[in-house]
Image (spheres, coloured by chain):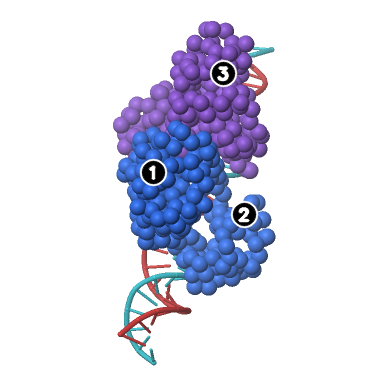
Chain colours: A blue, B purple, C red, D cyan
Amino acid sequence: MIDSDTRSRVLQLYPMLQELPAAELALASLMLIPAGTVMFDEDQPCQGFPLLLSGSLRVIKSSANGRELQLYRVMPGESCILTSSCLLGDTRYQARGIVEESLEMVMLPATVFHSLLRTCDAFRRYVFQLFTERLTDMMELVTAVAFQKLDQRLAGLLAGKPSPLLATHQTIADELGSAREMISRLLKGFAEQGWVRLGREQITVTDLAALKKFATF
Amino acid sequence: MIDSDTRSRVLQLYPMLQELPAAELALASLMLIPAGTVMFDEDQPCQGFPLLLSGSLRVIKSSANGRELQLYRVMPGESCILTSSCLLGDTRYQARGIVEESLEMVMLPATVFHSLLRTCDAFRRYVFQLFTERLTDMMELVTAVAFQKLDQRLAGLLAGKPSPLLATHQTIADELGSAREMISRLLKGFAEQGWVRLGREQITVTDLAALKKFATF
DNA sequence: TTCCTTATGTGAGGTTTATCACAGACGGCA
DNA sequence: TGCCGTCTGTGATAAACCTCACATAAGGAA
């Protein structure tokens, strides 16, 4: 199902799959998934282990009153640890996965995932590594939400993204788990400090150092 | 270093270690650690994989202004996933571990941990399982902190603990990442609703159903 | 008992964030 | 050009939470 070009792209991003017999990888197929697609949602079972070739996936939790919070983002070369978690524990998703930029991905069937884990040391290390990183991310997120003020978190977000950042205030609010008006007001404040320059759907960082300093204070 | 009685207690709580050659386990030693001990702290490296035989460990994050938040609790039969994470990623602790009830534990050296992961399927599954559970916990914690009001979280905490609960309001505040006065006030409210009865360092749940309902609303 | 430490109760006041209700601004499109 | 949908700005208000400052209470130790 997979052509040799795709196969080599997969192996480039996921070198730990070298050991996987070509036949098994061939069983998978390349999928193209448009932005906005809900890949999975809470309480759904999970089918396989996704290998992202391009695009990105937002993993979020949403609250009863319509607000949402981004838990983490999955990029090419990574994989959704929540999926691994589901596969390993045979449980269900505890969050929602939404395609941010349209995806090219190959879905590794659950059976292949399990046999890889059993036989391939490199793959195992890769999965452990993913778990480790995500757990770290989540711990940082918890402390940020619990202890940091919104302005600090916003500054941190801006400092950690390429500038100029193309996004609406609502998008940013969703990432931080807040409300659009708050973001607008805070951004205005940052602009008055000379830290950013604002445009429609565009935020340009003009004083990265100040933002970083403010974020970690 | 370990007597056969201890060895059998370890194997009872950690059956996945059956395959471990007796010689390797014998290298470890039984440690007794009093309540209040700081087992590890942020930015410290980590030595081994702890096997808890009795007692409990609180894993917390603390903020600049003196508040703290409990991430999770480690009980006998479990292990501190943060430790695994450190061992696997060769990174440092990102939180603080404080002994709650005094510990009996056996420390598995890092080398043994790694060889077990490589060779023992049952142990691997155990570690993956731990990761999965903690990740789930952390995701729930994040959403709770981000979206739930303090009164709901407090109700949930009370509903999830044995009654009567012996703890000071400060202890509870630390677990929830809040302030003591808030807990006192909210508890008073719960008492007025007839959901709990309050005593010094003691909270007795009198209407579990109401608490649960309120927590999940 | 008396003293002392720790735990709890409580009011006042402030900060932070959310919510509501619009107004204005921008950009694409007919 | 004019229209329309989306994005942004802004004030008013309220909710939730925190902080400070004490007062009171409960239990243990001398």
Pinpoint the chain carrying mark 2: A
Q: CA distance from mark 1 to mark 2?
A: 47 Å
Residue A166, above or below B207: below
Which image quadrant for residue A213?
Answer: bottom right
In the picture, measured across the screen, residue A100 lies left or right of residue B26, that is left
Q: Chain of mark 3?
A: B
Task: Identify the residue position indicated by label 1 in the image.
Answer: A24
Residue B126, position as x, y percentages in the image:
46, 27
Q: Can you say whether A126 is above or below C18 in the image?
A: above
Q: Which mark is residue B105?
A: 3
User: Circle 2 is placed at which residue position?
Assistant: A215
Q: Return the chain for callout 1.
A: A
Q: Amino acid at mark 2?
A: Ala
The amino acid on which the numbered mark 3 sits, given as a three-letter code, is: Met
* Rendered view: B74 above or below A68: above
Question: In x, y percent, where is residue C9?
Answer: 48, 33
- Give neighbour class at mark 2: few <14, some 14-19, many 20+ (Cα, 10 Å): many
